[in-house]
Amino acid sequence: MDAHAHDIQSHVKTYYMIFGALMVLTCITVGVSYLHLSVPLAITVALIVATLKGSLVALFFMHLSNERKLIYYVLTLTVVFFVFMMFVPLFTNSDKIPGTAVGTLW
Amino acid sequence: MEIPYTVEVRPDTGLSNGKFGVWLFLASEVMLFAALFSSYILLRVGSVEWPHGYEELSVPLAFFNTVVLISSSVTMVMAWASLKMNDFGKFKMHLGLTILLALTFLVVKFFEYEHHLAAGEGPSHNTFYAIYFTMTGLHGLHILGGVIVNSYLWGPGAKMWQTQKERFTNRIEIAGLYWHFVDLVWIFLFPVLYLL
């Protein structure tokens, strides 16, 4: 086996370890949902676990842990727009109709 | 005309054109799903009451589908790794498994949809089901697109391996990038729609 193939073999081991980690995190996120935590706490836990899982997929399966700078630039710009998009509903929340409950966060 | 930079990297980007193109496409896909997640937040914040996903939807089925999709990501990356190790037989097996797992996901989704539609819980039932069907429907279409591309690369497209090994390996890598993205979207859809 040449050095290159040996290198890939070590990657394969990593892929299976990441698979195990993703399964454990999936079980955690489902397990926590059965605790019926308050909505803000449940959202926080679910999003933290989902972000961890997503990071593992992006870093290892999509090889982002070792990628060209240009891709990082593109993704940084995407993240900026993504975060802005997530905050748009908050701006509308500050513009609620007086005397109504609608528009309050949960 | 020959397509440039399919194997060798383009000097100014340091990437093959296909790979850079797919990353740009995925950036636009992030914004497409971001718009829907943002809409979900807006609808949920603006509603007087909102059901818990686990009371309306089947968590065991979605958990099963999550395991299926994560497994398919592993088989996809293994298909690429097999080509890197010059093992075409293992590549066929892993990509074949990826396609089968994707079809399993769609079959489970079909039964979920059928159950809800039969119970009168279609997209027009309430806002929750409207956004549920929109987001999972768009994601399901992405799965279907992945199945079509992967099936081509498993079948007729695999002939390229005989003549242009490196170019074919790059094709599998970028098809994999798309597939992992589809898995990544589900990783967020699952808790947001089913568990909260």
Image (cartoon, coloured by chain):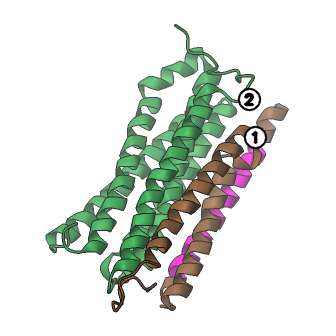
Chain colours: A brown, B green
Residue in the picture at 36% in, 73% down: B43
**Residue A69 image label:** 1
Q: Is residue A17 magenta?
A: yes
Along the horizontal axis of the image, is B19 left or right of B40? Answer: right
Is mark 2 in CB contact (under 8 Å) with mark 1?
A: yes
Number of marks? 2
Identify the chain of the residue marked 1, using the numbered disc in the image: A
| Residue type (three-letter) at the residue carrying disc 1 | Lys
Local secondary structure at mark 2 = loop
Q: Nearer the viewer, residue B131 or B171?
A: B131
Q: Is residue B127 magenta?
A: no
Q: Nearer the viewer, residue B115 or B96?
A: B115
Residue beneath disc 2: B14
Q: Main secondary structure of the magenta part?
A: helix
Q: Is residue B1 visible?
A: yes
Q: Is residue B94 visible?
A: no
Residue in the picture at 36% in, 60% down: B136
Q: Position of residue B192 (x, y in %)?
A: 45, 72
Along the horizontal axis of the image, is B173 left or right of B11? Answer: left
- Tags 2 and 1 both on a single chain: no
Q: Position of residue B143 (x, y in %)?
A: 40, 48
Local secondary structure at mark 1 = helix
Boundaries of the magenta span:
A9-31
Residue in the picture at 16% in, 74% down: B119
> Dividing the picture into quarters, in which one does residue B145 lie?
top left
